Image (cartoon, rainbow, N blue to C red):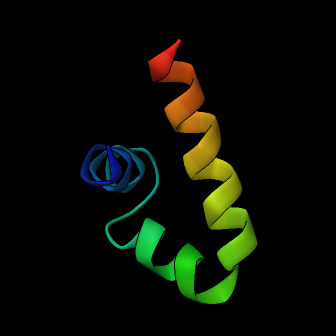
């Protein structure tokens, strides 16, 4: 799922968005990842 999240955010925003977010705002990255996983695991 992590790879899908990274691929999706790279397509929606810019290449490297997830990596940059994880470095600059780890809590925000975890929140967005959790929302993504909740959306697709329901």
Residue 1 picture location, percent across and down: 32, 43
* The quarter of the displayed image where residue 35 is located: top right
For the point 28% across and 43% down, the residue is: 4
Residue nearest the observer in this picture, 10 or 6: 6
Q: How many marks?
A: 0
For the point 61% across and 44% down, the residue is: 34
Answer left or right for 10 relative to 42. left
Answer left or right for 41 relative to 27. left
Residue 16 picture location, percent across and down: 36, 73
Answer left or right for 37 relative to 28. left
For the point 43% across and 44% down, the residue is: 12
For the point 56% across and 88% down, the residue is: 23
* The quarter of the displayed image where residue 39 is located: top right
Residue 28 picture location, percent across and down: 72, 65
Up the image or down, 20 lies above or below 37; here it is: below
Up the image or down, 8 lies above or below 10; here it is: above
Answer left or right for 31 relative to 18. right
């Amino acid at each position: 799922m992590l790879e899908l999240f990274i691929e999706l955010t790279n397509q929606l925003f810019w290449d490297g968005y997830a990596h940059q977010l994880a470095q600059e705002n780890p809590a925000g990255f975890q929140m967005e990842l959790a929302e993504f996983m909740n959306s697709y695991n329901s």
